[in-house]
Amino acid sequence: MGDRRTSAAADPAQRELTPRALLTGMALGALLAPCNVYSGLKIGWSFNMSITALLLAYAFWIPLCRWLGLARWDQLESNINQTTASSAASIISGGLVAPIPALALMTGENMPWLSLVGWVFAVSFLGIWVGWYLRDRLVVQSGLSFPAGVATAETLRDIFSHGRAAARRVATLLGSLGGAALFNAVDDFVWRIPRWAPNLGAQKFTFSLDPSLLLLGFGSIIGLRAGLGLLVGALVAWGLLAPWAVSVNIVSLPSTGSGFQALVGWLLWPGVAMMVTASLTSFVAALRLSGRRGVPGTDISHPAGRSRLAGLALAAVLVVALQIALFDIHWSMAVVAVPMAFVLATVASRVAGETGIPPIGAIGKVSQLSFGVLAPGQAVTNLMTANVAGGAAGQSADLLNDLKAGYEVGASPARQIVAQCFGVLTGSLVGSWVYLQIIADPVTQLLTPEWPAPAVATWKAVAETLSGGLGGIPESALVAMCISAPIGVFLALLERRLNGRALVWLPSGATVGLAFVVPASTSLTLFLGAFMAAVLHKVAPAWSARFLLSAAAGLVAGESLYGVVAVWWA
Protein backbone atom coordinates (compact mmCIF):
# COMPACT_ATOMS: atom_id res chain seq x y z
CA MET A 1 0.00 0.00 0.00
CA GLY A 2 2.77 2.43 0.91
CA ASP A 3 4.64 1.82 -2.34
CA ARG A 4 1.54 2.44 -4.38
CA ARG A 5 0.88 5.74 -2.64
CA THR A 6 4.37 7.11 -3.14
CA SER A 7 5.42 5.76 -6.51
CA ALA A 8 3.56 8.33 -8.58
CA ALA A 9 4.84 11.28 -6.60
CA ALA A 10 8.39 9.94 -6.71
CA ASP A 11 8.44 9.81 -10.51
CA PRO A 12 10.09 13.09 -11.67
CA ALA A 13 8.45 12.71 -15.10
CA GLN A 14 5.00 13.05 -13.56
CA ARG A 15 3.42 16.49 -13.94
CA GLU A 16 0.83 17.63 -11.43
CA LEU A 17 -0.25 21.25 -10.86
CA THR A 18 0.15 22.28 -14.50
CA PRO A 19 -1.75 25.14 -16.14
CA ARG A 20 -3.59 22.71 -18.40
CA ALA A 21 -4.69 20.54 -15.46
CA LEU A 22 -5.97 23.54 -13.54
CA LEU A 23 -7.69 25.13 -16.54
CA THR A 24 -9.27 21.83 -17.55
CA GLY A 25 -10.67 21.40 -14.04
CA MET A 26 -12.00 24.94 -14.04
CA ALA A 27 -13.62 24.48 -17.45
CA LEU A 28 -15.23 21.19 -16.42
CA GLY A 29 -16.27 22.72 -13.11
CA ALA A 30 -17.98 25.55 -14.98
CA LEU A 31 -19.75 22.93 -17.09
CA LEU A 32 -20.76 20.64 -14.22
CA ALA A 33 -21.67 23.15 -11.48
CA PRO A 34 -24.89 24.15 -13.30
CA CYS A 35 -25.93 20.47 -13.29
CA ASN A 36 -25.93 20.39 -9.49
CA VAL A 37 -27.66 23.77 -9.21
CA TYR A 38 -30.38 22.53 -11.56
CA SER A 39 -30.85 19.13 -9.89
CA GLY A 40 -30.63 20.64 -6.41
CA LEU A 41 -33.54 22.97 -7.16
CA LYS A 42 -35.46 20.16 -8.86
CA ILE A 43 -35.09 17.31 -6.38
CA GLY A 44 -32.87 18.52 -3.55
CA TRP A 45 -29.92 16.26 -4.41
CA SER A 46 -26.54 16.78 -6.00
CA PHE A 47 -23.99 14.43 -7.56
CA ASN A 48 -20.27 14.03 -6.90
CA MET A 49 -18.67 14.98 -10.21
CA SER A 50 -15.12 13.66 -9.62
CA ILE A 51 -15.40 10.56 -11.80
CA THR A 52 -17.28 12.44 -14.52
CA ALA A 53 -14.50 15.04 -14.60
CA LEU A 54 -11.85 12.31 -14.77
CA LEU A 55 -13.49 10.63 -17.76
CA LEU A 56 -14.19 13.83 -19.69
CA ALA A 57 -10.65 15.15 -19.25
CA TYR A 58 -9.18 11.78 -20.24
CA ALA A 59 -11.34 11.71 -23.37
CA PHE A 60 -10.12 15.18 -24.35
CA TRP A 61 -6.41 15.07 -23.54
CA ILE A 62 -5.31 11.53 -24.40
CA PRO A 63 -6.10 11.77 -28.15
CA LEU A 64 -5.13 15.46 -28.31
CA CYS A 65 -1.67 14.79 -26.84
CA ARG A 66 -1.19 11.93 -29.29
CA TRP A 67 -2.29 13.93 -32.35
CA LEU A 68 -0.35 17.10 -31.51
CA GLY A 69 2.71 15.44 -30.01
CA LEU A 70 2.19 17.08 -26.61
CA ALA A 71 3.49 15.77 -23.31
CA ARG A 72 1.25 12.95 -22.16
CA TRP A 73 -1.72 13.63 -19.88
CA ASP A 74 -0.54 12.25 -16.54
CA GLN A 75 -2.36 10.60 -13.67
CA LEU A 76 -1.49 13.35 -11.18
CA GLU A 77 -2.64 16.04 -13.62
CA SER A 78 -5.91 14.16 -13.89
CA ASN A 79 -6.19 14.20 -10.11
CA ILE A 80 -5.69 17.98 -10.02
CA ASN A 81 -8.35 18.28 -12.71
CA GLN A 82 -10.91 16.26 -10.73
CA THR A 83 -10.11 18.13 -7.50
CA THR A 84 -10.76 21.46 -9.21
CA ALA A 85 -13.89 20.31 -11.02
CA SER A 86 -15.47 18.52 -8.05
CA SER A 87 -15.01 21.52 -5.76
CA ALA A 88 -16.67 23.76 -8.35
CA ALA A 89 -19.57 21.33 -8.77
CA SER A 90 -19.96 21.06 -4.97
CA ILE A 91 -20.53 24.80 -4.70
CA ILE A 92 -24.25 24.28 -4.04
CA SER A 93 -23.32 23.35 -0.47
CA GLY A 94 -22.54 27.07 -0.14
CA GLY A 95 -26.30 27.69 -0.01
CA LEU A 96 -27.40 28.06 -3.63
CA VAL A 97 -30.21 25.49 -3.41
CA ALA A 98 -31.27 25.90 0.24
CA PRO A 99 -30.71 28.91 2.57
CA ILE A 100 -30.07 31.49 -0.16
CA PRO A 101 -33.34 30.80 -2.07
CA ALA A 102 -35.14 30.52 1.30
CA LEU A 103 -33.86 33.99 2.16
CA ALA A 104 -35.05 35.23 -1.24
CA LEU A 105 -38.55 33.88 -0.54
CA MET A 106 -38.63 35.67 2.80
CA THR A 107 -37.32 39.00 1.50
CA GLY A 108 -38.95 38.85 -1.93
CA GLU A 109 -35.77 39.32 -3.95
CA ASN A 110 -32.47 37.69 -4.83
CA MET A 111 -29.08 38.90 -3.68
CA PRO A 112 -27.07 40.86 -6.30
CA TRP A 113 -24.67 38.66 -8.27
CA LEU A 114 -21.43 40.07 -6.82
CA SER A 115 -22.71 39.82 -3.25
CA LEU A 116 -23.88 36.28 -3.92
CA VAL A 117 -20.51 35.30 -5.40
CA GLY A 118 -18.64 36.76 -2.43
CA TRP A 119 -20.84 35.02 0.12
CA VAL A 120 -20.80 31.58 -1.53
CA PHE A 121 -17.03 31.78 -1.99
CA ALA A 122 -16.44 32.82 1.62
CA VAL A 123 -18.36 29.97 3.28
CA SER A 124 -16.84 27.44 0.86
CA PHE A 125 -13.35 28.88 1.40
CA LEU A 126 -13.81 28.34 5.14
CA GLY A 127 -14.64 24.70 4.41
CA ILE A 128 -11.38 24.27 2.48
CA TRP A 129 -9.30 25.33 5.47
CA VAL A 130 -11.32 23.20 7.86
CA GLY A 131 -10.71 20.19 5.61
CA TRP A 132 -7.00 21.00 5.26
CA TYR A 133 -6.71 21.33 9.04
CA LEU A 134 -8.38 17.89 9.50
CA ARG A 135 -6.51 16.10 6.72
CA ASP A 136 -3.71 14.44 8.72
CA ARG A 137 -6.00 12.94 11.35
CA LEU A 138 -8.92 11.90 9.15
CA VAL A 139 -7.17 10.82 5.96
CA VAL A 140 -3.71 9.64 7.05
CA GLN A 141 -4.12 8.46 10.66
CA SER A 142 -7.75 7.38 11.14
CA GLY A 143 -8.09 4.80 8.40
CA LEU A 144 -11.55 6.09 7.45
CA SER A 145 -12.70 4.67 4.13
CA PHE A 146 -13.95 7.85 2.38
CA PRO A 147 -15.83 5.75 -0.21
CA ALA A 148 -16.18 8.55 -2.78
CA GLY A 149 -12.45 9.32 -2.60
CA VAL A 150 -11.46 5.66 -2.90
CA ALA A 151 -13.84 5.20 -5.87
CA THR A 152 -12.20 8.20 -7.55
CA ALA A 153 -8.70 6.80 -6.93
CA GLU A 154 -9.73 3.38 -8.28
CA THR A 155 -11.18 4.98 -11.40
CA LEU A 156 -8.04 7.07 -11.80
CA ARG A 157 -5.79 4.02 -11.68
CA ASP A 158 -8.17 2.02 -13.87
CA ILE A 159 -8.35 4.48 -16.77
CA PHE A 160 -4.57 4.86 -16.90
CA SER A 161 -3.93 1.12 -16.79
CA HIS A 162 -6.81 -0.08 -19.02
CA GLY A 163 -7.09 2.39 -21.88
CA ARG A 164 -9.72 0.51 -23.89
CA ALA A 165 -12.03 0.09 -20.90
CA ALA A 166 -11.63 3.78 -20.13
CA ALA A 167 -12.57 4.66 -23.70
CA ARG A 168 -15.74 2.57 -23.41
CA ARG A 169 -16.69 4.28 -20.15
CA VAL A 170 -16.14 7.68 -21.74
CA ALA A 171 -18.24 6.64 -24.74
CA THR A 172 -21.02 5.50 -22.37
CA LEU A 173 -20.91 8.81 -20.51
CA LEU A 174 -20.94 10.97 -23.63
CA GLY A 175 -23.57 8.81 -25.33
CA SER A 176 -26.00 9.05 -22.43
CA LEU A 177 -25.28 12.79 -22.05
CA GLY A 178 -26.03 13.47 -25.71
CA GLY A 179 -29.04 11.14 -25.66
CA ALA A 180 -30.57 12.93 -22.66
CA ALA A 181 -30.10 16.35 -24.27
CA LEU A 182 -31.60 15.11 -27.56
CA PHE A 183 -34.52 13.48 -25.73
CA ASN A 184 -35.40 16.77 -24.05
CA ALA A 185 -35.00 18.74 -27.29
CA VAL A 186 -37.44 16.37 -29.03
CA ASP A 187 -39.83 16.71 -26.08
CA ASP A 188 -39.71 20.52 -26.31
CA PHE A 189 -39.70 21.14 -30.06
CA VAL A 190 -40.82 18.05 -32.01
CA TRP A 191 -43.21 15.84 -30.09
CA ARG A 192 -44.49 16.27 -26.55
CA ILE A 193 -43.71 12.96 -24.87
CA PRO A 194 -46.83 11.90 -22.93
CA ARG A 195 -46.88 12.03 -19.12
CA TRP A 196 -48.68 8.89 -18.06
CA ALA A 197 -51.21 9.19 -15.24
CA PRO A 198 -53.99 6.85 -14.05
CA ASN A 199 -56.68 9.55 -14.41
CA LEU A 200 -57.27 13.27 -14.10
CA GLY A 201 -57.95 12.97 -10.38
CA ALA A 202 -54.57 11.36 -9.85
CA GLN A 203 -52.91 14.24 -11.70
CA LYS A 204 -54.51 16.65 -9.21
CA PHE A 205 -52.47 14.88 -6.56
CA THR A 206 -49.34 14.93 -8.78
CA PHE A 207 -49.46 11.20 -9.57
CA SER A 208 -47.99 10.63 -13.01
CA LEU A 209 -44.86 9.14 -14.52
CA ASP A 210 -42.45 11.92 -15.42
CA PRO A 211 -40.34 10.90 -18.45
CA SER A 212 -37.26 12.60 -17.01
CA LEU A 213 -33.94 10.96 -17.79
CA LEU A 214 -32.34 13.07 -15.06
CA LEU A 215 -34.66 11.48 -12.49
CA LEU A 216 -34.02 8.00 -13.85
CA GLY A 217 -30.27 8.63 -13.71
CA PHE A 218 -30.39 9.99 -10.18
CA GLY A 219 -32.57 7.08 -9.13
CA SER A 220 -29.94 4.61 -10.29
CA ILE A 221 -27.28 6.53 -8.34
CA ILE A 222 -29.12 6.84 -5.01
CA GLY A 223 -29.90 3.13 -4.85
CA LEU A 224 -32.88 0.93 -4.07
CA ARG A 225 -33.23 1.84 -0.40
CA ALA A 226 -33.59 5.55 -1.10
CA GLY A 227 -35.91 4.77 -4.02
CA LEU A 228 -38.16 2.66 -1.80
CA GLY A 229 -38.22 5.42 0.81
CA LEU A 230 -39.39 7.90 -1.82
CA LEU A 231 -42.06 5.49 -3.06
CA VAL A 232 -43.41 4.92 0.45
CA GLY A 233 -43.35 8.66 1.19
CA ALA A 234 -45.18 9.51 -2.05
CA LEU A 235 -47.90 6.93 -1.41
CA VAL A 236 -48.42 8.11 2.18
CA ALA A 237 -48.22 11.86 1.49
CA TRP A 238 -49.87 12.25 -1.90
CA GLY A 239 -51.94 9.06 -1.95
CA LEU A 240 -53.35 9.11 1.59
CA LEU A 241 -52.78 12.38 3.46
CA ALA A 242 -53.41 14.75 0.54
CA PRO A 243 -56.83 13.26 -0.42
CA TRP A 244 -57.78 13.20 3.27
CA ALA A 245 -56.81 16.87 3.71
CA VAL A 246 -58.99 17.77 0.73
CA SER A 247 -61.92 15.64 1.89
CA VAL A 248 -62.07 17.35 5.31
CA ASN A 249 -61.57 20.84 3.78
CA ILE A 250 -58.12 21.46 5.27
CA VAL A 251 -56.84 22.17 1.75
CA SER A 252 -58.83 23.46 -1.24
CA LEU A 253 -57.66 22.38 -4.70
CA PRO A 254 -57.76 24.75 -7.69
CA SER A 255 -60.39 24.04 -10.34
CA THR A 256 -57.75 23.46 -13.02
CA GLY A 257 -54.18 22.24 -13.08
CA SER A 258 -52.11 20.53 -10.43
CA GLY A 259 -52.87 20.84 -6.74
CA PHE A 260 -49.18 20.78 -5.81
CA GLN A 261 -48.85 24.33 -4.50
CA ALA A 262 -51.99 24.14 -2.42
CA LEU A 263 -51.11 20.75 -0.94
CA VAL A 264 -47.38 21.21 -0.36
CA GLY A 265 -48.07 24.18 1.93
CA TRP A 266 -49.66 21.68 4.34
CA LEU A 267 -47.67 18.53 3.59
CA LEU A 268 -44.28 20.16 4.06
CA TRP A 269 -44.84 20.37 7.84
CA PRO A 270 -45.03 16.64 8.59
CA GLY A 271 -42.40 16.04 5.89
CA VAL A 272 -39.98 18.55 7.40
CA ALA A 273 -40.59 17.17 10.89
CA MET A 274 -39.70 13.66 9.76
CA MET A 275 -36.60 14.79 7.82
CA VAL A 276 -35.32 16.93 10.70
CA THR A 277 -35.84 14.34 13.46
CA ALA A 278 -34.39 11.50 11.37
CA SER A 279 -31.37 13.57 10.36
CA LEU A 280 -30.73 14.88 13.87
CA THR A 281 -31.02 11.41 15.41
CA SER A 282 -28.44 10.07 12.96
CA PHE A 283 -26.32 13.15 13.59
CA VAL A 284 -26.33 12.70 17.37
CA ALA A 285 -25.31 9.07 16.95
CA ALA A 286 -22.42 10.14 14.71
CA LEU A 287 -21.47 12.89 17.19
CA ARG A 288 -21.23 10.34 20.01
CA LEU A 289 -19.03 8.15 17.82
CA SER A 290 -16.78 11.10 16.96
CA GLY A 291 -16.55 12.03 20.64
CA ARG A 292 -15.37 8.54 21.56
CA ARG A 293 -12.71 8.68 18.86
CA GLY A 294 -11.45 12.11 19.83
CA VAL A 295 -11.51 15.48 18.10
CA PRO A 296 -9.25 15.56 15.05
CA GLY A 297 -6.59 18.19 14.80
CA THR A 298 -3.20 19.10 13.43
CA ASP A 299 0.23 19.90 14.83
CA ILE A 300 0.44 23.69 15.16
CA SER A 301 4.08 23.55 16.25
CA HIS A 302 5.06 22.60 12.71
CA PRO A 303 5.28 25.38 10.04
CA ALA A 304 2.72 23.59 7.87
CA GLY A 305 0.37 23.39 10.86
CA ARG A 306 0.78 27.10 11.55
CA SER A 307 0.05 27.96 7.91
CA ARG A 308 -3.15 25.92 8.06
CA LEU A 309 -4.20 27.71 11.22
CA ALA A 310 -3.43 31.07 9.60
CA GLY A 311 -5.54 30.18 6.56
CA LEU A 312 -8.38 29.10 8.83
CA ALA A 313 -8.18 32.42 10.68
CA LEU A 314 -8.24 34.41 7.42
CA ALA A 315 -11.28 32.50 6.17
CA ALA A 316 -13.03 33.04 9.51
CA VAL A 317 -12.45 36.81 9.39
CA LEU A 318 -13.85 36.95 5.85
CA VAL A 319 -16.99 35.01 6.81
CA VAL A 320 -17.63 37.16 9.90
CA ALA A 321 -17.18 40.39 7.93
CA LEU A 322 -19.60 39.31 5.20
CA GLN A 323 -22.26 38.18 7.69
CA ILE A 324 -22.23 41.67 9.16
CA ALA A 325 -21.97 43.57 5.86
CA LEU A 326 -24.45 41.59 3.75
CA PHE A 327 -27.09 40.48 6.28
CA ASP A 328 -26.72 42.90 9.19
CA ILE A 329 -26.09 40.01 11.58
CA HIS A 330 -24.91 41.10 15.01
CA TRP A 331 -21.16 40.70 15.35
CA SER A 332 -21.48 38.36 18.33
CA MET A 333 -23.65 35.91 16.38
CA ALA A 334 -21.38 36.22 13.34
CA VAL A 335 -18.38 35.27 15.47
CA VAL A 336 -20.14 32.36 17.17
CA ALA A 337 -21.09 30.95 13.75
CA VAL A 338 -17.44 30.18 12.94
CA PRO A 339 -16.49 27.80 15.78
CA MET A 340 -19.89 26.16 15.47
CA ALA A 341 -19.23 25.65 11.76
CA PHE A 342 -15.82 24.15 12.57
CA VAL A 343 -17.25 21.63 15.04
CA LEU A 344 -20.16 20.64 12.82
CA ALA A 345 -17.97 20.41 9.70
CA THR A 346 -15.62 18.12 11.65
CA VAL A 347 -18.49 15.77 12.43
CA ALA A 348 -19.81 15.94 8.86
CA SER A 349 -16.36 15.15 7.49
CA ARG A 350 -15.99 12.13 9.75
CA VAL A 351 -19.45 10.87 8.79
CA ALA A 352 -18.57 11.34 5.10
CA GLY A 353 -15.39 9.37 5.74
CA GLU A 354 -17.35 6.50 7.26
CA THR A 355 -20.44 6.40 5.04
CA GLY A 356 -19.64 8.45 1.94
CA ILE A 357 -22.60 10.78 2.62
CA PRO A 358 -21.95 14.18 4.26
CA PRO A 359 -25.02 15.06 6.41
CA ILE A 360 -25.27 18.65 5.16
CA GLY A 361 -29.02 18.88 5.81
CA ALA A 362 -28.64 17.73 9.41
CA ILE A 363 -25.71 20.09 9.95
CA GLY A 364 -27.85 23.00 8.81
CA LYS A 365 -30.71 22.02 11.10
CA VAL A 366 -28.42 21.70 14.14
CA SER A 367 -27.09 25.16 13.45
CA GLN A 368 -30.58 26.56 12.89
CA LEU A 369 -31.81 25.08 16.16
CA SER A 370 -28.76 26.42 18.00
CA PHE A 371 -29.24 29.96 16.72
CA GLY A 372 -32.97 29.66 17.35
CA VAL A 373 -31.92 29.61 21.02
CA LEU A 374 -29.07 32.14 20.75
CA ALA A 375 -30.93 34.63 18.51
CA PRO A 376 -34.68 34.00 18.90
CA GLY A 377 -37.01 35.74 16.49
CA GLN A 378 -34.26 36.54 13.95
CA ALA A 379 -35.02 34.53 10.81
CA VAL A 380 -32.23 36.01 8.65
CA THR A 381 -29.63 35.37 11.33
CA ASN A 382 -30.98 31.84 11.70
CA LEU A 383 -30.68 31.10 7.98
CA MET A 384 -27.34 32.65 7.17
CA THR A 385 -25.39 31.56 10.23
CA ALA A 386 -26.58 28.03 9.48
CA ASN A 387 -25.44 28.60 5.89
CA VAL A 388 -21.91 29.06 7.26
CA ALA A 389 -22.00 25.62 8.89
CA GLY A 390 -23.56 23.90 5.88
CA GLY A 391 -21.19 25.50 3.37
CA ALA A 392 -18.10 24.73 5.44
CA ALA A 393 -19.23 21.13 5.99
CA GLY A 394 -19.93 20.55 2.30
CA GLN A 395 -16.59 21.80 1.01
CA SER A 396 -14.65 20.20 3.84
CA ALA A 397 -16.17 16.79 3.04
CA ASP A 398 -15.54 17.27 -0.70
CA LEU A 399 -11.92 18.27 -0.10
CA LEU A 400 -11.25 15.32 2.19
CA ASN A 401 -12.62 12.93 -0.44
CA ASP A 402 -10.26 14.54 -2.97
CA LEU A 403 -7.36 14.35 -0.51
CA LYS A 404 -8.14 10.68 0.08
CA ALA A 405 -8.00 10.05 -3.68
CA GLY A 406 -4.73 11.99 -3.88
CA TYR A 407 -3.29 10.09 -0.92
CA GLU A 408 -4.06 6.80 -2.66
CA VAL A 409 -2.19 7.81 -5.85
CA GLY A 410 0.69 9.72 -4.23
CA ALA A 411 -0.42 13.28 -4.99
CA SER A 412 0.72 16.44 -3.22
CA PRO A 413 -2.01 17.58 -0.78
CA ALA A 414 -0.79 21.20 -0.83
CA ARG A 415 -1.24 21.31 -4.60
CA GLN A 416 -4.72 19.89 -4.24
CA ILE A 417 -5.55 22.74 -1.86
CA VAL A 418 -4.55 25.23 -4.56
CA ALA A 419 -6.74 23.35 -7.06
CA GLN A 420 -9.65 23.34 -4.61
CA CYS A 421 -9.41 27.11 -4.16
CA PHE A 422 -9.54 27.68 -7.92
CA GLY A 423 -12.47 25.29 -8.15
CA VAL A 424 -14.41 27.10 -5.44
CA LEU A 425 -13.79 30.42 -7.19
CA THR A 426 -15.04 28.98 -10.49
CA GLY A 427 -18.08 27.41 -8.89
CA SER A 428 -18.97 30.61 -7.03
CA LEU A 429 -18.88 32.68 -10.22
CA VAL A 430 -20.71 30.23 -12.46
CA GLY A 431 -23.07 28.69 -9.91
CA SER A 432 -24.30 32.08 -8.68
CA TRP A 433 -24.89 33.29 -12.24
CA VAL A 434 -26.78 30.11 -13.18
CA TYR A 435 -28.94 30.30 -10.06
CA LEU A 436 -29.92 33.90 -10.81
CA GLN A 437 -30.70 32.99 -14.43
CA ILE A 438 -32.87 30.02 -13.47
CA ILE A 439 -34.65 31.60 -10.50
CA ALA A 440 -35.07 35.19 -11.63
CA ASP A 441 -38.30 35.60 -9.60
CA PRO A 442 -38.05 33.36 -6.52
CA VAL A 443 -41.47 34.27 -5.11
CA THR A 444 -43.37 32.97 -8.15
CA GLN A 445 -40.97 30.24 -9.28
CA LEU A 446 -39.95 28.35 -6.14
CA LEU A 447 -42.04 25.67 -4.40
CA THR A 448 -43.89 24.96 -7.65
CA PRO A 449 -44.18 21.72 -9.67
CA GLU A 450 -41.44 22.98 -12.00
CA TRP A 451 -39.07 23.98 -9.16
CA PRO A 452 -40.13 22.10 -6.00
CA ALA A 453 -36.85 23.05 -4.25
CA PRO A 454 -37.40 20.69 -1.29
CA ALA A 455 -34.32 21.87 0.59
CA VAL A 456 -35.55 25.47 0.30
CA ALA A 457 -38.92 24.49 1.78
CA THR A 458 -37.22 22.78 4.70
CA TRP A 459 -34.80 25.61 5.56
CA LYS A 460 -37.52 28.25 5.23
CA ALA A 461 -39.98 26.29 7.37
CA VAL A 462 -37.47 25.75 10.17
CA ALA A 463 -36.35 29.40 10.13
CA GLU A 464 -39.92 30.72 10.23
CA THR A 465 -40.95 28.29 12.95
CA LEU A 466 -37.99 29.19 15.15
CA SER A 467 -38.60 32.87 14.45
CA GLY A 468 -42.36 33.12 14.86
CA GLY A 469 -43.18 30.11 16.98
CA LEU A 470 -45.67 27.35 16.23
CA GLY A 471 -48.66 29.71 16.15
CA GLY A 472 -48.40 30.20 12.38
CA ILE A 473 -48.69 26.48 11.62
CA PRO A 474 -52.20 25.08 11.03
CA GLU A 475 -53.42 22.97 13.95
CA SER A 476 -53.96 19.96 11.70
CA ALA A 477 -50.36 20.24 10.46
CA LEU A 478 -49.12 20.34 14.07
CA VAL A 479 -50.94 17.08 14.76
CA ALA A 480 -49.36 15.56 11.64
CA MET A 481 -45.94 16.79 12.81
CA CYS A 482 -46.43 15.16 16.22
CA ILE A 483 -47.04 11.86 14.43
CA SER A 484 -44.28 12.11 11.79
CA ALA A 485 -41.50 13.38 14.08
CA PRO A 486 -41.34 10.23 16.27
CA ILE A 487 -41.49 8.08 13.14
CA GLY A 488 -38.34 9.83 11.89
CA VAL A 489 -36.58 9.13 15.20
CA PHE A 490 -37.68 5.48 15.17
CA LEU A 491 -36.49 4.87 11.61
CA ALA A 492 -33.10 6.49 12.34
CA LEU A 493 -32.60 4.38 15.47
CA LEU A 494 -33.71 1.20 13.73
CA GLU A 495 -31.34 1.66 10.80
CA ARG A 496 -28.37 1.61 13.18
CA ARG A 497 -29.37 -1.90 14.26
CA LEU A 498 -29.71 -3.28 10.75
CA ASN A 499 -27.17 -3.91 8.04
CA GLY A 500 -26.73 -5.66 4.72
CA ARG A 501 -29.85 -6.81 2.91
CA ALA A 502 -32.18 -6.07 5.80
CA LEU A 503 -31.27 -2.37 5.72
CA VAL A 504 -32.25 -2.07 2.03
CA TRP A 505 -35.89 -2.70 2.92
CA LEU A 506 -36.02 -0.10 5.70
CA PRO A 507 -37.02 3.33 4.35
CA SER A 508 -34.97 6.18 5.77
CA GLY A 509 -36.86 8.99 7.45
CA ALA A 510 -35.00 11.57 5.36
CA THR A 511 -36.16 10.11 2.02
CA VAL A 512 -39.72 9.43 3.21
CA GLY A 513 -39.95 13.03 4.43
CA LEU A 514 -38.45 14.33 1.20
CA ALA A 515 -41.28 12.72 -0.76
CA PHE A 516 -43.73 14.97 1.13
CA VAL A 517 -42.26 18.11 -0.46
CA VAL A 518 -41.69 17.03 -4.08
CA PRO A 519 -44.41 15.98 -6.54
CA ALA A 520 -45.34 12.30 -6.42
CA SER A 521 -44.30 12.05 -10.08
CA THR A 522 -40.72 12.93 -9.09
CA SER A 523 -40.58 10.26 -6.39
CA LEU A 524 -42.10 7.61 -8.67
CA THR A 525 -39.58 8.23 -11.45
CA LEU A 526 -36.67 8.23 -8.99
CA PHE A 527 -37.90 4.91 -7.63
CA LEU A 528 -38.19 3.51 -11.15
CA GLY A 529 -34.56 4.49 -11.83
CA ALA A 530 -33.42 2.84 -8.60
CA PHE A 531 -35.40 -0.32 -9.38
CA MET A 532 -34.03 -0.55 -12.92
CA ALA A 533 -30.48 -0.15 -11.59
CA ALA A 534 -31.05 -2.91 -9.02
CA VAL A 535 -32.29 -5.23 -11.77
CA LEU A 536 -29.26 -4.42 -13.93
CA HIS A 537 -26.91 -5.18 -11.04
CA LYS A 538 -28.58 -8.60 -10.78
CA VAL A 539 -28.72 -9.58 -14.46
CA ALA A 540 -25.53 -7.85 -15.68
CA PRO A 541 -23.27 -7.32 -12.64
CA ALA A 542 -20.02 -6.95 -14.58
CA TRP A 543 -21.44 -4.36 -17.00
CA SER A 544 -23.18 -2.48 -14.18
CA ALA A 545 -20.05 -2.30 -12.03
CA ARG A 546 -18.08 -0.73 -14.86
CA PHE A 547 -20.57 1.32 -16.89
CA LEU A 548 -23.79 2.03 -14.96
CA LEU A 549 -22.42 5.01 -13.03
CA SER A 550 -21.09 6.55 -16.26
CA ALA A 551 -24.45 6.09 -17.99
CA ALA A 552 -26.35 7.57 -15.04
CA ALA A 553 -23.97 10.53 -14.74
CA GLY A 554 -24.46 11.24 -18.43
CA LEU A 555 -28.25 11.28 -18.06
CA VAL A 556 -28.02 13.70 -15.13
CA ALA A 557 -25.54 15.99 -16.87
CA GLY A 558 -27.32 15.89 -20.24
CA GLU A 559 -30.75 16.90 -18.99
CA SER A 560 -29.34 19.43 -16.49
CA LEU A 561 -27.20 21.18 -19.09
CA TYR A 562 -30.05 21.20 -21.58
CA GLY A 563 -32.40 22.62 -18.93
CA VAL A 564 -29.98 25.39 -17.95
CA VAL A 565 -29.39 26.35 -21.59
CA ALA A 566 -33.13 26.26 -22.34
CA VAL A 567 -33.94 28.54 -19.40
CA TRP A 568 -31.14 30.93 -20.33
CA TRP A 569 -32.21 30.95 -23.99
CA ALA A 570 -35.83 31.66 -23.05
Image: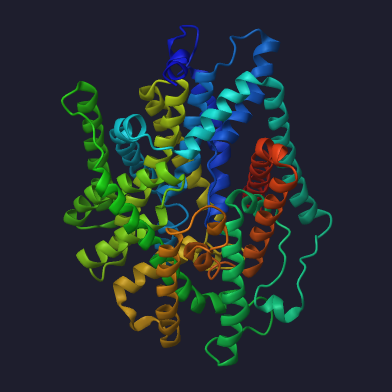
Note whether 140 is above or below 548 in the view shown. Answer: above
Which residue corresponds to the image point at 27% horizontal and 38% vertical from the top-left? 315
The answer to whether residue 479 shows anywhere in this view is: yes
Whole-percent x, y for residue 169 in the image? 69, 32
* Of 199 and 4, the residue lying toward us: 4
Q: Nearer the viewer, residue 410 or 204?
A: 410
Residue 435 x, y percent position in the rendering: 51, 51
**How many numbered marks are there?**
0
Q: Going 72% across and 38% down the picture, which residue do you hit? A: 543
State the image quarter where residue 73 is shown: top right
Q: Is residue 84 left or right of residue 568?
A: left
Does residue 348 sit above or below 199 in this rendering? above
Q: Residue at x 54, y 71 (%)?
A: 516
The foreground one among 226 and 120 is 226
Q: Is residue 111 visible?
A: no
Name the residue rendered at 43%, 27% in the picture: 419
Q: Is residue 322 above or below residue 106?
A: above
The x, y position of residue 305, in whole percent, is: 22, 27
Query: Height in image: 510 above or below 557?
Result: below
**Which residue is farthest right?**
191
| Left or right: 263, with 324 as reference point | right
Quadrant of the rendering where the N terminus is positioned = top left
- Coloring basis for residues: rainbow
User: Could you say which quadrant of the image residue 475 lies in?
Assistant: bottom left
Instruction: Please provide percent x and percent y for residue 514.
Output: 52, 65
